Image: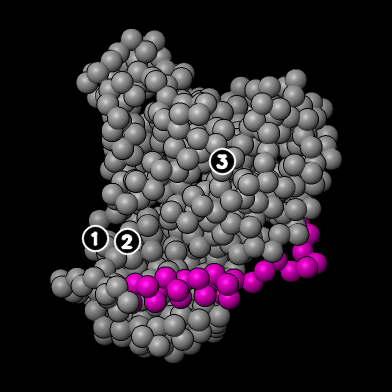
């Protein structure tokens, strides 16, 4: 069986308003029906595994200088499935001299993470703090260009490897103004944050792009409203922003408030993911920790939680004993509260981070070399969890990668090749994921098929008459949690049939 290299249709039509509204409604229906709740008797024994039950991650900040501490690495490896470099990917660490990048410490953290099966969040690309002296002494257009060059340089080094980047960090002022922080970056012009995000999207289209800040958890605070208004404006104008990170450093000066859940819900309603990115709680109250976890679990687009350190002795504020393990590495009562909350969660997984895995080979549908070029043929490849293997099933039946590329059939006959193409709403980009494990093209009625029954890395995919072979059987997983395809297909079909 040969792969047909037919080009996709050239006429790209936009969806009508009523159909867009209907699809949005279908998505809500799918969120309610399609994904099973965590079973009542589920009980995972580590934080990462417990979070994965709802399709989320549970991560920690890792310091390269502590990777030689076996107690530290044992806990981190056992408990967490997402890693953020504590300081090693910041500006002063990665570009100590202008144009001279140094990724040695960042790579230590990254390599440790991926060698132990974990994903990595990048932190941070543009920030008023921890700038090298040469950057602190710059201003105006020269500083603006230095910021752009820095984003391009760092993201090029880690292209295709980072789950999400904190593109801009802490750009809003504390207090009651709701406005921007006065910084050398702000003084280059009010559009500097937008420029940073547009630069980052061009540098690595596969990475999620986040704004990250502290003291924006309380919905009533002016700083929270200032960030909210910026994100709303960005979404309205098409500025590429995918997520907002809430640092969640809770203490007596910035205590946890029960409206944090409202904050997460309201930001998510703008069309961005939300994440808790640097969690620590003064005194490590078990009740407060459980409340924070439950707030995330209650919001489908809350994709994960990161605590800012492993043990209290590793914390940036050790005197507050704010973390889940004491200085000797023992689990604290807060650890048990968090684990119980994660095991008892009944929320729906976030709608992204799904892998399409071949039943016959165990390999995943993969975009070669993390390409974003229209017409790139997909393949089977060893599953590794990076962005080029993460597919989102939309209410319209599309399978999206990178947020704006769709799994696309380059024809309607046997042998038509499967590729990525910019999403446009055509039926050749819509799929039915069936309970028997088959994935059927809506336009053609043919099955997604591994060419020649191949199982090796690099095997191409095509459309072919459905015949029930194992090379036409697939599983669609959100993280490690399987989605139920029957409910998804039923809910979507009913909604679209009524149009």
Quadrant position of the N terminus in the picture: bottom left
Answer few, some or many: residues within 10 Å of disc 2's Cα (few below 14, many 20 plus, some between 14 and 19).
Answer: many
- Reading the image, the residue beneath label 2 is 405
Q: Earlier in the sequence, mark 3 or mark 2?
A: 3
Q: Residue at x 75, y 53 (%)?
A: 341
Q: Residue at x 51, y 26 (%)?
A: 174
- Reading the image, the residue beneath label 1 is 374
Picture coordinates of residue 158 (x, y %)?
40, 37
Q: Residue at x 34, y 72 (%)?
A: 20
Q: Which of the 4 image quarters holds residue 59?
A: top right
For the rendered model, the colour scheme is one colour
Residue nearest the viewer, comparing 240 with 113 = 240
Picture coordinates of residue 454 (x, y %)?
42, 72
- Quick check: marks 1 and 2 in contact, CB under 8 Å? yes
Q: Secondary structure at mark 3?
A: loop
Q: Is residue 133 visible?
A: yes
- Of tags 3 and 2, the one toward the viewer is 3
Q: Secondary structure at mark 2?
A: strand
| Residue 354's disc number | none
Region in magenta: 19-44
Indicate left or right for 75 with 149 as reference. right
Quadrant position of the C terminus in the picture: bottom left
Q: CA distance from mark 1 to mark 2?
A: 8 Å
Q: CA distance from mark 3 to mark 1?
A: 44 Å
Answer few, some or many: residues within 10 Å of disc 3's Cα (few below 14, many 20 plus, some between 14 and 19).
Answer: few
- Reading the image, the residue beneath label 3 is 220
Q: Earlier in the sequence, mark 3 or mark 1?
A: 3
Residue nearest the viewer, comparing 369 with 12 = 12
* Residue 41 vertical placement versus 324 (above, below): below
């Amino acid at each position: 069986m040969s792969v047909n290299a037919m080009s996709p249709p050239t006429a790209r039509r936009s969806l009508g308003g009523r159909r867009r509204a209907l699809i949005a409604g279908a998505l809500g229906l799918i969120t309610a029906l399609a994904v099973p709740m965590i079973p009542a008797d589920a009980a995972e024994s580590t934080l990462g595994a417990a979070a994965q039950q709802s399709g989320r991650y549970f991560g920690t900040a890792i310091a390269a200088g502590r990777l030689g501490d076996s107690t530290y690495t044992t806990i981190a490896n056992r408990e967490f499935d997402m890693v953020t470099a504590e300081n090693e990917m910041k500006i002063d660490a990665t570009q100590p001299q202008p144009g001279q990048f140094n990724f040695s410490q960042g790579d230590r953290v990254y390599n440790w993470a991926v060698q132990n099966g974990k994903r990595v969040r990048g932190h941070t690309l543009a920030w008023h703090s921890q700038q090298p002296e040469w950057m602190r002494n710059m201003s105006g257009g020269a500083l603006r260009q230095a910021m752009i060059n820095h984003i391009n340089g760092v993201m090029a080094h880690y292209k295709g490897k980072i789950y999400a980047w904190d593109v801009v960090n802490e750009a809003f002022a504390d207090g009651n103004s709701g406005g921007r922080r006065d910084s050398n970056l702000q003084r280059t012009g009010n559009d500097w944050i937008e420029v940073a995000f547009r630069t980052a999207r061009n540098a690595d289209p596969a990475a999620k792009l986040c704004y990250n800040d502290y003291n924006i958890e309380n919905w009533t605070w002016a700083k929270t409203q200032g960030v909210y208004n910026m994100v709303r404006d960005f979404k309205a104008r098409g500025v590429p922003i995918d997520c907002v990170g809430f640092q969640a450093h809770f203490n007596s000066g910035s205590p946890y408030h029960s409206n944090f859940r409202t904050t997460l819900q309201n930001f998510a309603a703008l069309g961005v993911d939300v994440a808790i990115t640097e969690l620590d709680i003064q005194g490590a109250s078990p009740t407060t920790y459980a409340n924070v976890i439950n707030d995330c679990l209650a919001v489908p687009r809350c994709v994960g939680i990161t605590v800012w350190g492993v043990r209290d002795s590793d914390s940036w504020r050790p005197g507050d004993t704010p973390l889940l393990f004491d200085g000797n590495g023992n689990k604290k009562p807060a650890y048990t509260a968090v684990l119980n909350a994660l095991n008892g969660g009944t929320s729906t997984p976030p709608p992204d981070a799904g892998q399409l895995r071949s039943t016959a080979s165990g390999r995943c549908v993969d975009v070669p070399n993390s390409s974003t070029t229209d017409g790139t043929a997909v393949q089977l490849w060893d599953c590794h969890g990076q962005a080029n293997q993460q597919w989102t099933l939309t209410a319209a039946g599309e399978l999206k990668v990178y947020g704006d590329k769709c799994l696309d059939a380059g024809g309607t006959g046997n042998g038509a090749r499967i590729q990525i193409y910019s999403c446009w709403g055509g039926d050749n980009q819509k799929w039915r994921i069936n309970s028997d494990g088959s994935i059927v093209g809506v336009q053609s009625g043919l099955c997604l098929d591994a060419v020649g029954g191949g199982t090796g890395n690099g095997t191409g995919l095509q459309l072919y008459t459905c015949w029930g072979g194992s090379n036409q059987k697939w599983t669609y997983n959100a993280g490690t949690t399987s989605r139920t395809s029957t409910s998804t297909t039923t809910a979507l079909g009913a909604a679209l049939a009524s149009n």
